[in-house]
């Protein structure tokens, strides 16, 4: 039998229809995706512009407190009873840390950290905002400052802050009258104006230091700074200087105070020396 060859003829009309259908589907999909993209851009760039602009600004600009200088205390003859001496404090800004505990462990390899230091830090951490510095160690010596400074680039959020600490040049003389300052604790925070104690770690605890806390403390200042991604300050945009605390001049006479305290020796008792002309307290002893 003779071979018959089968010829397959293309249906160009049908193929054109299929091609056009696919082209229309692709065009519809592209148009839909474009509309979604445009809608998202409108939402980000127009509808929610202020929100995202604020987030961007907050990532770039930080508000930092400038603590005021505490006022000095003098006796009636101008003898200094309480002053401020420079000191270095190690602070952590947890906002810039991936793992706070790991950072503390690294710091512990460089300087001595006690359990009390870490416990106090964790307690204060619950009352501070993430962008605020939280003290970890106080009164670092020059060697400790140098070790932290050399390794600071490896530990984002670790800062060394130069502060002033309270010092009493006459030691225990008149201590029960003058009082002392101590670190702010959780109980203190309940009664304090936290906005005025930002960046401040000490408060008057007893005696004149406590009774005249409002006058001695002063008013906190603020500075708006621009930072990079690591939290490093690039420049200061705006600054409001703090108002230093007022100096106090007491009626107390430390020479008379020294004589009165020495007079008691090992005995217990109390003494108040008053100027009868005006009622000024010249010496106050309670042993």
Image: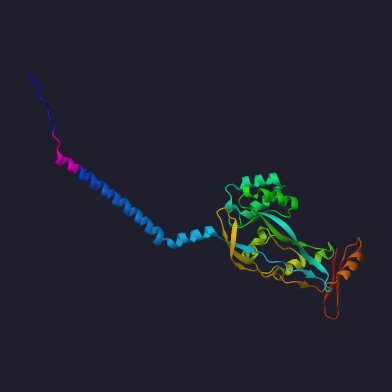
Give the quadrant of residue 198: bottom right
Give the quadrant of residue 240: bottom right
- Residue 230 in magenta stretch: no
At x 40%, y 60%, the residue is 45
x and y percentages locating residue 185 in the rendered image: 68, 58
Give the camera-side residue of 54 and 116.
Answer: 54
Give the camera-side residue of 227 and 200.
Answer: 227
- Residue 17 in magenta stretch: yes
Q: Using the image, determine if residue 203 lies above or below residue 1.
A: below
Q: Which residues are magenta?
A: 9-18
Label the magenta part by its dominant secondary structure.
Answer: helix
x and y percentages locating residue 128 in the rendered image: 61, 57
Residue furthest toward the left? 1
Give the camera-side residue of 113 and 27.
Answer: 27
Colouring scheme applied when the structure was drawn: rainbow
Query: Would residue 282 be visible to someone looking at this image?
Result: yes
Query: Would residue 141 be visible to someone looking at this image?
Result: no
> Horizontally, is 3 left or right of 55 in the view?
left
């Amino acid at each position: 039998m003779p071979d018959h060859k089968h010829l397959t003829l293309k249906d160009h009309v049908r193929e054109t229809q299929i091609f056009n259908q696919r082209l229309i589907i692709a065009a519809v999909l592209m148009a839909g995706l474009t509309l979604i993209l445009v809608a998202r851009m409108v939402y980000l760039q127009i509808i929610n512009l202020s929100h995202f602009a604020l987030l961007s600004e907050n990532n770039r600009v930080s508000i930092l407190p400038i603590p005021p200088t505490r006022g000095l205390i003098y006796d009636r003859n101008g003898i200094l009873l309480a002053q401020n001496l420079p000191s270095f404090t190690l602070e952590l800004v947890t906002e810039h840390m991936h793992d706070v505990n790991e950072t503390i462990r690294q710091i512990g390899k460089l300087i001595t950290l006690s359990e009390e230091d870490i416990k106090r830090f964790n307690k204060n951490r619950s009352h501070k905002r993430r962008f605020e510095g939280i003290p970890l160690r106080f009164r670092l010596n020059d060697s400790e400052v140098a070790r932290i400074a050399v390794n600071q680039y490896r530990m984002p959020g670790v800062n060394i802050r130069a502060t002033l600490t309270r010092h009493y040049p006459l030691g225990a003389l008149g201590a029960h009258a003058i009082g002392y300052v101590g670190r702010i604790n959780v109980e203190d925070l309940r009664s304090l104006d936290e906005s005025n104690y930002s960046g401040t770690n000490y408060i008057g605890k007893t005696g004149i230091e406590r009774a005249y806390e409002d006058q001695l403390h002063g008013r906190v200042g603020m500075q708006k700074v621009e930072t990079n991604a690591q939290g490093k300050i690039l420049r200061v945009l705006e600054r409001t200087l703090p108002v230093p605390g007022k100096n106090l001049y007491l009626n107390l006479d430390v020479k008379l105070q020294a004589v009165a305290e020495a007079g008691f020796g090992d005995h217990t008792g109390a003494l108040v020396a008053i100027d009868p002309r005006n009622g000024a307290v010249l010496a106050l002893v309670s042993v």
